[in-house]
Amino acid sequence: MAPHNPAPEDGQSNVQFVDSSVPLYYQLATILREKIISGRFVVGDKFPTEADLVVLYSVSRATVRGALQSLKDEGLIRREAGRGTFVSGMPEFTGTLKMDGTLNGLIAMGLATSPRLVELQQVTVTAQQAEVLGMEPGTPAIRACRVRYYKDHPYCYIINTLPVDIGEKLSEADWESGSILQHLQTEHHIQLGDADEYVRATVADANLARWLQVRIGAPLLQVDYLIRDSKGRPVESPTIFYRSDMHAFTLRLTWSPESPGKAEGWSLRDE
C-alpha cells in the first residue's frame, strides 16, 4: 500500500507567524507538531522535504531545519538516508488520564499518580490568597509544590496552600504518597464538604517547563480549587498545572427547568 501523504492545503504558503518575539523555527515546529497530533500525518507517512516546507511556509532553510530537528528530538519524525523523513511516533500519553470534575475524581487522580515533593515551607499569604482562604493578609500558611507522575512521565505540577493548623498535620511522607485529601479525611478526621473550581488555559514558564518536561510556552491547563470542609471552612487552595497532551475533563450535563437567562454556575469575566 502506498504511503499516505496529505497534500498541502491551498493558501498554506501564506501562513502568518504572528509572534515576532518567538523564533520562527519554534513556531513552525509547533504547526508541524499539531499536524502529527491531529492525525493529518500518521506514523509511517513520508514528511514533506525541506525544500517543500521552505516554499509552503515562506521561511528559510535554516528555520525548517531547526523545526525538523525539534520534531526529531521529540521522537515524532525520523530521517532515513536516501529515502527522506518519516513520521515515527506520537506523544505517548495523549488523552490517557481523565477526571470527572468531582472531589472523588481529584482523590482518584492522587491515587493513580506518583507525587514528588519539590518544596515545602511556611509562607505569608498574599492579599488574594487571604481572601480565598478566609484569612487576614500576612497570615502564615503552609505551601507545598509537587510534581505528579503518571507511568513515569510528569503529568501535573501542583501548588498546595493550606492554613498552618491543617498543613502542619501533614508530614513530608504524606506529601509524597497517595492523596492529600485522603490523608486529611482518613488520618486527620477532616470531613470534606465541597469545592469551587476555576479552569483556564495558560502556558509553561521556565519553571513549569522544567518540571513537566515540556517546551517553554507549551499549552497547559490551569485549575484553581478552593476546597472546604463539611462546615464550610477552607481546607486548602491548590493550583494545578496539567499537561494538555495528557489531561482532559469529562462533565455530564443535565437539563434544568430553570429559564436559560436565570441559570446559575457561569459568568463572563471582563479583565
Image (tube, helix red, strand yellow):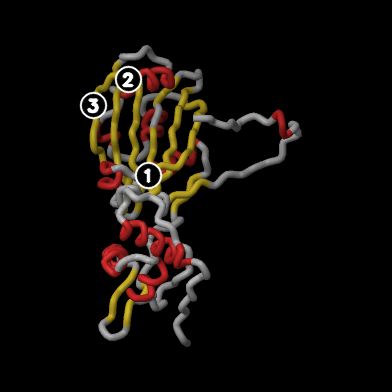
| Image location of residue 231, percent across then percent down | 50, 18
Q: Amino acid at mark 2?
A: Val
Question: What numbered label is drawn on residue 60?
Answer: none
Residue 62: give x, y in percent of width and height: 26, 66
Q: Which residue is located at x 29 percent, y 17 percent?
A: 140
Q: CA distance from mark 1 to mark 3?
A: 25 Å
Q: Which residue is mark 2?
A: 125
Quadrant in which residue 73 is drawn: bottom left
The vertical placement of 235 against 34, above or below, is above
Q: Residue at x 68, y 41 (%)?
A: 254
Q: Residue 93, how many percent across, how many down?
A: 39, 58
| Residue matched to label 3 | 121
The answer to whether residue 112 is seen in the rendering is no
**Separation of disc 3 and disc 2 at Cα?**
12 Å
Label 3 packing within 10 angstroms: few (<14), some (14-19), many (20+): few
Determine crowd level at label 1: few under 14, some 14-19, many 20+ residues with C-alpha closer than 10 A.
some
- Between marks 1 and 3 in the image, the one whose residue lies nearer the viewer: 1
Front label number (3 vs 2)? 2
Which one is nearer the viewer's eye here, 207 or 118? 207
Q: Are marks 1 and 3 in contact (CB under 8 Å)?
A: no
Give the side of residue 256 with respect to residue 175, left or right: right
Q: Quadrant of residue 3?
A: bottom left
Camera-near label (2 vs 1) is 1
Residue flagged by tag 1: what amino acid is it?
Val
The residue positioned 41% from the left and 23% from the top of the image is 235
Q: Quadrant of residue 180?
A: top left
The residue to which callout 1 is attached is 203
Pointer 2 or 1: first along the chain: 2
Q: Amino acid at mark 3?
A: Gln
